[in-house]
Image (spheres, grey):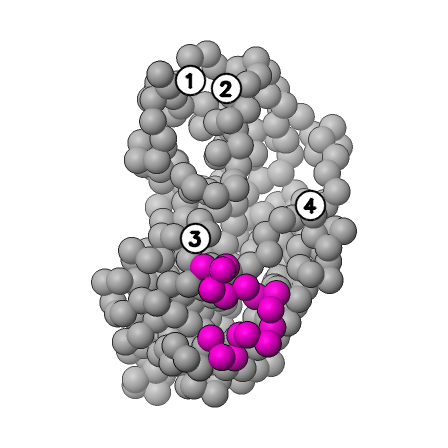
Amino acid sequence: MKLLVTGANGQIGWELRRSLTAIGDVLAIDREACDLSRLRDLPGIVRTAKPDVIVNAAAYTAVDRAEDEEELATLVNGTAVGIIAEEARRLGALLVHYSTDYVFDGAKDSPYAEDDQTNPINAYGRSKLAGERAIGQSGSDYLILRTCWVFAARGHNFLRTILRLAQERDELSVVADQIGTPTWARLIAQATARIVQCTCRERGGADFTSEILHVTAGDSTSWCGFAEAILDQAMGRGLLRNRPKLRPISSSEYPLPAARPKNSRLAGARVRERFGITLPDWQPGLVQCIQEGFKRAP
């Protein structure tokens, strides 16, 4: 089996290089080789690779900048994704694509199921929803994996930001009224590999159904709760000399260009029922990520 991975240097893409190697030959390409904003290049890239499976981990992810660059965000997260889906259909390949909790408005009191009404409240969420819809209209075999609050030891993410700020400041003010599930990129990549394996068996037996699945770690917390756990681990591992004071604040006290959902929790029943996959709670992933990815302070 030949797998094409886009966004190879991103948080999830980097982990996919390792997780997918166990199930097939992986061609992992980064933004330099496959820039989703260059639409005319995409058909040739896919046709040259001739993959059995395309795992699209490339995306426009600058949530706040997207408020001023919605056209570009939609080009990358919507139009380009539709082109990749069309090429997957032509090749008879499976497309696996990542989406986000930001397609929801966050007004629901409980975790969101896959069939809940979408209603993005920012430009980034609208662009990702455009990609979901383009895939659904393409006629390709696909799985869309929505996830939430992704972190890793590399890339731009909340974990790395908190560790950086903790070395610079004596006090950190962190939003406490937005709830979600921090999910380690490695867990997503490992789950993706299992899903691809199972899906290929389904397709071989003509028992495959395209659908959207929610793939996140278990349990939930606020951004402030996540920050507290990060600081606990950082102090315990000797990554910080001094622990900054943590001050919980409301979203209104920390205005950003893009509105965020208050509730970002995603229900994982569907992926559990179809593939027998239940990701562990988020805390052990954080512990392992910090142990492996960050060195002690000198």
Three-letter amino acid code of the residue under disc 4: Asp
Q: Which residues are magenta?
A: 30-45
Residue that label 4 marks? 64
Quadrant housing the C terminus: top left
Residue that label 3 marks? 9
Three-letter amino acid code of the residue under disc 2: Gln
| Cα distance between the residues tagged 1 and 4 | 29 Å
Three-letter amino acid code of the residue under disc 3: Asn
Q: Give the vertical position of 245 relative to 146 (above or below).
A: above
Helix, strand or loop status at disc 1: loop
Q: Residue at x 53, y 32 (%)?
A: 161
In this orientation, does residue 117 appear?
no
Residue that label 1 marks? 240
Q: Are marks 1 and 2 in contact (CB under 8 Å)?
A: yes
Three-letter amino acid code of the residue under disc 1: Leu
| Cα distance between the residues tagged 4 and 2 | 24 Å
Query: Which residue in the rendered view is the most extreme toward the front?
Result: 32
Residue that label 2 marks? 167
Q: Residue at x 35, y 78 (%)?
A: 52
Q: Nearer the viewer, residue 107 or 12?
A: 12
